[in-house]
């Protein structure tokens, strides 16, 4: 027996709830994106020791940890915002929300601290963006953390902004640099950089 049978509901019941509750649909899409990423791209034989972190564990600011060429690399997974998606020049444009689920106090490298929903830069290595809303296909865009835009919010000082990721990241389809449709060029780049620093 599966969960649907255990709950005594039908696929039609589940479809009705998801159709009527966008917030529930958004949560489910987020978990499905992680599941699809794990079962497809991260099942590649070049990836070892894949760990999916507990979503409630704030000490680990990423969704996955993996080993690639002997290097430990972390990946955060986010999805396009459905309402942001539109056609553009024969392709698509959308925005991905890249922030924490609630406001919390974080400490910045300059010694200051602040309450924010912004994610701290450099706390994970790669962002994987679920692009399902573009073409109704489970595909992803990958970008290094260091390539992500920083916050421009006026509530933060210029110094603080350099440590905080922007909460909204624009994405075009077809993908344009610095986005990639595969994580492997980025994984190789990170592994190469870390090997050179260990010498």
Image: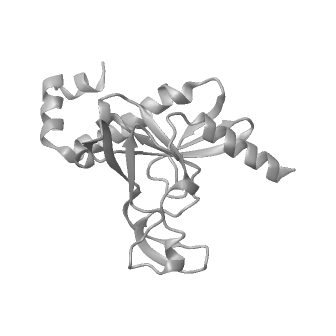
Residue 83 versus residue 41: which sits nearer the camera? Answer: 83
- Asked whether 91 or 48 is in front, the reply is 91
Residue most toward the right? 199
Q: Quadrant of residue 87?
A: top left
Q: Is residue 194 left or right of residue 116?
A: right
Residue 62 lies, in percent from the top left, at 52, 50
Counting from the top left corner in percent of width and height, residue 142 is at: 50, 42
Q: Quadrant of residue 166?
A: bottom left
Asked if residue 86 is positioned above or below residue 56 in the image, the reply reads above
Q: Is residue 75 left or right of residue 104?
A: right
Q: Does residue 10 show up?
A: no
In the image shown, does 42 or 54 lie closer to the viewer?
42
Residue 77 seen by the camera: yes
Image check: 54 left or right of 132? right
- The image shows residue 128 at horizontal and vertical percentages of 48, 42
Horizontal and vertical percent position of residue 187: 64, 39
82 relative to 121, above or below = above
On the rendered image, what quadrant is the N terminus found in?
Answer: top left
The scheme the figure's colours follow is: one colour
Q: Is residue 186 above or below residue 48?
A: below
């Amino acid at each position: 027996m599966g969960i649907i049978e255990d709950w005594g509901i039908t696929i039609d019941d589940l479809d009705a709830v998801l159709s009527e509750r966008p917030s529930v649909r958004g949560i489910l899409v987020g978990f499905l994106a992680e599941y699809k990423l794990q079962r497809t791209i991260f099942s590649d034989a070049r990836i070892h020791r894949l760990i999916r972190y507990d979503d409630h564990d704030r000490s680990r600011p990423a969704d996955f940890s993996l080993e690639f060429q002997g290097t430990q690399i972390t990946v955060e997974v986010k999805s396009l915002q459905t309402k942001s998606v539109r056609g553009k020049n024969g392709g698509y444009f959308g925005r991905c929300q890249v922030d924490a689920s609630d406001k919390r106090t974080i400490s910045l490298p300059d010694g200051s601290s602040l309450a924010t929903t912004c994610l701290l830069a450099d706390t994970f290595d790669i962002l994987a963006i679920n692009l399902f809303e573009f073409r109704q296909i489970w595909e992803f865009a990958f970008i290094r953390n260091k390539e992500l835009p920083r916050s421009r919010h006026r509530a933060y000082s210029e110094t603080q902004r350099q440590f905080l990721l922007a909460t909204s990241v624009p994405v075009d389809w077809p993908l344009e640099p610095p986005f990639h449709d595969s994580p492997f060029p980025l994984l190789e780049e990170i592994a190469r950089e870390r090997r050179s620093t260990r010498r």
